[in-house]
């Protein structure tokens, strides 16, 4: 072979190898990290979605999401109130473990401790970009805000949308400052009305998805609605048979549709886990401006089923078989560890209470990873325990309308307050509305659940029992520098 021929063979071989290496370097991994979206509404009742039984509110996008995904019909908020519920969702812990109780007020001296790990912080360690658009409500001091808890982007309000000068109790019970709208750590506006918030947060979510289509992301869309005061844009005003409240839910449904449409247009829907649920049940004393928890008992601010059982839809094409309904109990504290399993992300180093329910979602298991769920409320009161199909209530005081109608035109009526004097037990499989106390008929179940409760009391305490907890962690506190 001549020298020229050898040179030709060598160059051809070299170039072929170079091209092969170049092609290998440009290959895109087929098993990309899944994106995660949580859509979280505020004070939405169990029945306030078409597929969950609403007779008057049309929710075609949520219904389609459920048809292609999974309906969780026994899903619960960690507590029946704003801040505590959000703390449970984002940290995977019972709110009592991390010292977050009730609904934090503006200028709260406490907030989510920087030592806690949120879903956003957990996923950022695994290379995710993160954003929250909507309501935060885990402390409005700068050190507690979303950008300090793992979120790259934030546009929203720092607490509930009724914490402003137009509150019905302003001047009598409250002295609220104007409601601020934040972008990251800066106030960009103070709100005199809120009709464009659902649209704004939806548009920012869509933009975030498009900007991160080539990068794994976590989006937390936390709508301030349908918490009172109710606001809706002109495109949905007067559209629902359920009045203004129905209009608001229809606009949230539109928002869900925009999110799913964007995922489909960007080719991301098959690789994105979408979870839709709410923070607690309806605020019943607002009447016409509140939702419905039917067929469950009571609503927001109680440990009865209507206070914390929420509509929940999970959508994950190609990973989860759609068109199913699952009635195994779950709680929003289980979302963080489930996301960790799905994304291959390490769990927080600190003890959390939630457990992955991925095997239940896939159908591989029909057993809850929890022996029981514990329903705390107020500061640290263990009011109820869910064990299998049984729900046991310890003596406590709760609020109720006692069958009276709620308020009209955005004005609440006062609750009655009733003392539950003895233990009550309900079989939810036979009595979903909790109408018949069967404690005297099942002493062995009462004894079993009471023992479980005592075990948890020694971990998280119970103000009603006067038992000091041994594993409670402290909330973050504002301190002088």
Image (cartoon, grey):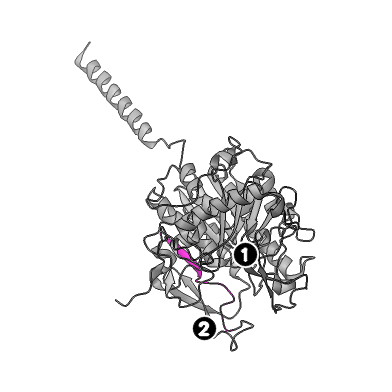
In the rendered view, would you say 292 is above or below 123? below
In the rendered view, would you say 174 is above or below 434? below
Q: Residues within 10 Å of mark 2 (few under 14, many from 20)?
A: few
Return the residue at label 1: 395
Determine if the magenta segment contains residue 155: yes
Alpha carbon separation for disc pair 1 and 2? 38 Å
Q: Position of residue 19 (x, y in %)?
A: 34, 30
Q: Position of residue 425 (x, y in %)?
A: 68, 55
Check the image and name the residue furthest to the bottom: 171
Specify the segment rendered in magenta: 150-165
User: Is 241 situated left or right of 15 in this image?
Assistant: right
Closer mark to the observer between disc 1 and disc 2: 1
Q: Position of residue 196 (x, y in %)?
A: 61, 71
In the rendered view, would you say 59 is above or below 371? below
Q: Quadrant of the N terminus?
A: top left
Return the residue at label 2: 177
Residue nearest the viewer, comparing 203 with 426: 426
- Secondary structure, mark 1, is loop
Main SS class of the magenta portion in the image: loop
User: Is 447 situated left or right of 184 in this image?
Assistant: right
Q: Earlier in the sequence, mark 1 or mark 2?
A: 2
Determine if the magenta segment contains residue 396: no
Q: Residue at x 61, y 38 (%)?
A: 366
Marks 1/2 in contact by CB < 8 Å: the verdict is: no
- Secondary structure, mark 2, is loop
Check the image and name the residue furthest to the top: 1
The quarter holding residue 299 reads bottom right
Residue 236 shows up from this direction: no
Residue nearest the viewer, comparing 45 with 376: 376
The quarter holding residue 325 reads top right
């Amino acid at each position: 072979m001549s020298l020229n021929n050898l040179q030709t063979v060598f160059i051809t071989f070299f170039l072929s190898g170079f091209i092969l290496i170049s092609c290998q370097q440009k290959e895109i991994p087929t098993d990309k990290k899944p994106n995660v979206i949580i859509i979280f509404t505020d004070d939405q009742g169990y029945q306030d979605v078409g597929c969950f039984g609403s007779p008057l509110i049309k929710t075609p996008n949520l219904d389609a999401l459920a048809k292609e995904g999974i309906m969780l019909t026994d899903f619960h908020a960690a507590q029946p109130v704003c801040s505590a519920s959000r703390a449970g969702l984002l940290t995977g812990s019972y709110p009592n473990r991390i010292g977050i109780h009730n609904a934090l007020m503006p200028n709260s001296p406490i907030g989510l401790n920087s030592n806690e790990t949120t879903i956003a912080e957990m996923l950022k360690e695994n290379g995710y970009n993160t954003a929250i658009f909507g309501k935060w409500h885990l402390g409005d001091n700068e050190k507690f805000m979303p950008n300090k808890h793992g979120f790259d982007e934030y546009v929203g309000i720092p607490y509930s949308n009724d914490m402003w000068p137009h509150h019905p109790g302003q001047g009598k019970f409250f002295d609220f400052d104007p409601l601020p709208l934040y972008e990251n750590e800066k106030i960009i506006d103070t709100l005199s009305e809120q009709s464009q918030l659902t649209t704004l947060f939806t548009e920012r979510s869509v933009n975030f998805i498009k900007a991160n289509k080539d990068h794994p992301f976590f989006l937390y869309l936390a709508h301030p609605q349908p918490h009172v005061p109710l606001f809706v844009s002109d495109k949905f005003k007067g559209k629902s048979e359920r009045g203004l409240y129905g209009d608001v839910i229809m606009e949230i449904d539109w928002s869900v549709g925009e999110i799913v449409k964007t995922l489909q247009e960007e080719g991301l829907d098959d690789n994105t886990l979408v979870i839709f649920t709410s923070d607690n049940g309806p605020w019943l004393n607002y009447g016409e401006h509140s939702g419905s928890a039917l067929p469950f008992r009571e609503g927001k601010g109680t440990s009865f089923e209507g206070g914390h059982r929420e509509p929940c839809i999970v959508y994950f094409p190609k990973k989860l078989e759609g068109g199913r309904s699952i009635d195994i109990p779950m709680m929003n504290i289980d979302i963080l560890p489930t996301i960790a399993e799905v994304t291959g992300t390490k769990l927080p180093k600190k003890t959390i209470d939630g457990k992955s329910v991925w095997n239940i979602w896939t159908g591989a298991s029909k057993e809850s990873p929890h022996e029981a769920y514990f329903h705390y409320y107020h500061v640290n009161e263990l009011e109820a325990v869910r064990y299998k199909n049984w729900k046991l209530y310890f003596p406590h005081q709760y609020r109720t309308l006692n069958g009276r109608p709620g308020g009209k035109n955005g004005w609440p009526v006062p609750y009655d307050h009733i003392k539950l004097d003895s233990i009550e037990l309900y079989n939810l499989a036979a009595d979903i509305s909790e109408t018949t106390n069967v404690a005297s008929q099942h002493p062995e179940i009462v004894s079993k659940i009471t023992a479980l409760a005592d075990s948890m009391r020694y971990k998280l305490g119970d103000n009603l029992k006067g038992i000091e907890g041994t594993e409670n962690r402290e909330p973050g506190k504002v301190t002088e520098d």
